[in-house]
């Protein structure tokens, strides 16, 4: 066999060997279990402590608050500017805090107790726009928030969740990060977050990814500080829970 024929024959064998070989496939590992259900369960858990603040049973929602329990009694933590007209007017039982079922829209409202005889149960701080007010009962279907331990050390970049009632829509959840701190910008002791908020979210709850309640919404992007300075677009303001107000506890109510 000539050299040329032998070369052609060898090339043919190489082609048959590699050209007809079965390709090798790597079997990808099974996908990680979806976290969608876990995320939904988490969102429902933190929404169960959300309260919609209204002038009365038939009025629209004007702000947000979070249900907490102190010494077995129901309270609402919110931003002072949500209820400052109630405090100033000392109107007593007319304003309500409502728990709204996310899926049915059914609501149950408790009275906000600001009248004579309840002054010792009301805590306000104008400097941090904080207000803690008693309720006459736990709204049906609600669940008091789990407080973070006092002195929690916030970390820039950590994940946070916000629940509130923007534009009067109950049970809206957004997620973002702790974006920074606000020293010297007119919001003493406050923090920045990129989590979306809007009118009506004021007083809404800020939660860690562990489900612990750590703060309340004070102002949204585009607002101005008390000294008239503009807040950076896309950043919203919240404050940590006040220390020394007895904020603690976790309870379920049917």
Image (cartoon, grey):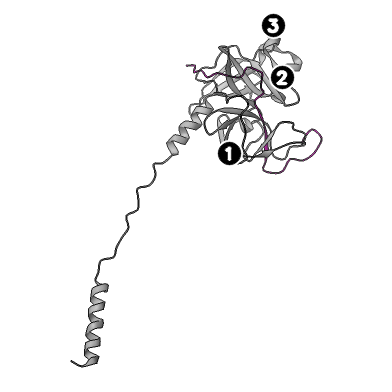
Rendered residue at 73%/13% (across/down): 90
Q: Magenta part of the protein: which range?
A: 225-254
Q: Residue at x 66, y 16 (%)?
A: 133
Residue lying at the far top in this picture: please name it.
117
Residue pointed to by mark 1: 158
Residue that numbered label 3 is attached to? 117
Query: Residue 124, labelled with which disc?
Result: 2
Quarter of the image for residue 96 reads: top right
Viewer-proximal residue, 12 or 254? Answer: 12
Q: Secondary structure at mark 2?
A: strand
Is residue 62 or residue 129 the one in the foreground?
129
Regarding residue 57, the answer to whether it shows in the image is: no
Q: CA distance from mark 2 to mark 3?
A: 16 Å
Is 30 on the left or on the right of 45, as rendered?
left
For marks 2 and 3 on the same chain, the one whose residue lies earlier in the sequence: 3
Viewer-nearest of discs 1 and 2: 1
Mark found first going from the N terminus, 1 or 2: 2
Q: What predominant SS class does the magenta segment belong to?
A: loop
Q: Where is residue 78 drawn, in percent x and y? A: 65, 24
Neighbor class of circle 1 (other Cα within 10 Å; few <14, some 14-19, many 20+) is: few
Which residue sits at x=63%, y=36%? 197
* Residue 124 position within the rendered picture, expressed as x and y whole percent measured from the top left: 72, 19
Instruction: Mark 1 vs mark 3: give the one in front.
Output: 1
Q: Looking at the picture, how far across and down is residue 10, in whole percent?
A: 23, 83
| Quarter assignment of residue 80 | top right
């Amino acid at each position: 066999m000539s050299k040329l024929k032998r070369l052609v024959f060898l090339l043919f064998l190489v082609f048959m060997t590699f050209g007809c070989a079965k390709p090798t496939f790597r079997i990808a590992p099974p996908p990680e279990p979806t976290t969608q259900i876990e995320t939904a369960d988490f969102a429902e858990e933190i929404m169960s402590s959300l309260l919609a603040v209204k002038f009365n049973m038939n009025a629209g929602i004007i702000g947000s608050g979070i249900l907490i329990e102190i010494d077995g009694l129901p309270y609402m933590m919110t931003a002072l500017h949500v209820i400052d007209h109630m405090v100033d007017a000392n109107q007593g039982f007319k304003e309500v805090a409502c728990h709204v079922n996310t899926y049915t829209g059914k609501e149950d409202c408790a009275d906000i107790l600001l009248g004579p005889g309840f002054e010792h149960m009301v805590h306000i701080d104008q400097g941090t726009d904080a207000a803690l007010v008693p309720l006459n009962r736990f709204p049906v279907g609600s669940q008091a928030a789990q407080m973070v331990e006092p002195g929690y050390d916030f970390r820039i970049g950590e994940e946070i969740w916000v629940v509130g009632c923007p534009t009067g829509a109950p049970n809206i959840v957004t997620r973002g990060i702790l974006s920074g701190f606000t020293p010297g910008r007119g919001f003493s002791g406050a923090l920045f977050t990129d989590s979306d908020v809007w009118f009506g979210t004021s007083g809404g709850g800020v939660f860690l990814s562990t489900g612990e309640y750590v703060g309340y919404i004070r102002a949204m992007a585009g607002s101005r500080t008390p000294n008239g300075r503009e807040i950076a677009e896309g950043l919203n303001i919240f404050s940590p829970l006040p220390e020394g107000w007895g904020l603690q506890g976790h309870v379920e109510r049917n």
